[in-house]
Image (spheres, rainbow, N blue to C red):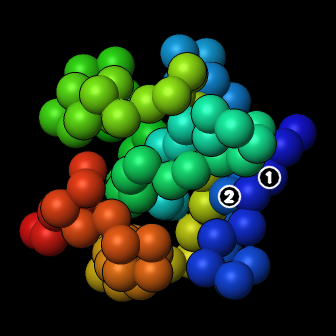
Amino acid sequence: MTSLALVDRKYIFEELCELSEFDPQYRQGLYAVFTESSTDGRYSVLYVGETGNYDGRGFSNHHKRPCWEQRKNRNLYIAIHKTPNQTADDRREIESEIIDYYGLLNFCNDRR
């Protein structure tokens, strides 16, 4: 299982897989959508979101999917950051921190 560390290793996103193969077994948390860099095989963050229920989120028809498709290099990948004891407000705070850190505002993310 591959994991990626974001925000200077502060948040670990686990279970990296192609978005088309994402089958969440976990209930709530944050998710990050990535693409591979075209030159060095590293992953670049395209989008960060939070949810109280991965199963109900609907990634194949996500409202930001067109942005992800437009900006991907090859494939789209997703990984999750588990937040078992955190509220929706806690998740949104982490989401905002990651968006700010990576400059994702007006990229594929926007403020709520």
Along the horizontal axis of the image, is 16 left or right of 2?
A: left
Q: Residue at x 42, y 49 (%)?
A: 46
Vertical comparison of 15 with 18: above or below: below
Vertical comparison of 69 with 64: above or below: above
Residue 5 on image: x %, y %: 73, 67
Q: Residue at x 53, y 15 (%)?
A: 20
Along the horizontal axis of the image, is 76 left or right of 40?
A: left
- Which residue carries the number 2 mark? 13
Disc 2 to disc 1, C-alpha distance: 5 Å
Q: Residues within 10 Å of mark 2 (few under 14, many from 20)?
A: many
Q: Residue at x 45, y 81 (%)?
A: 101
Res. 38 mark: none
Instruction: Check the picture and name the quadrant holding the N terminus.
Output: top right
Q: Are marks 2 and 1 in contact (CB under 8 Å)?
A: yes
Residue 94 on image: x %, y %: 44, 79
Along the horizontal axis of the image, is 102 left or right of 112?
A: right
Foreground of the two, 30 or 37: 37
Amino acid bearing label 2: Phe
Along the horizontal axis of the image, is 103 left or right of 101?
A: left
Q: Residue at x 56, y 22 (%)?
A: 75
- Which residue carries the number 1 mark? 3
Amino acid bearing label 1: Ser
The number of callouts visible is 2
Q: Earlier in the sequence, mark 2 or mark 1?
A: 1
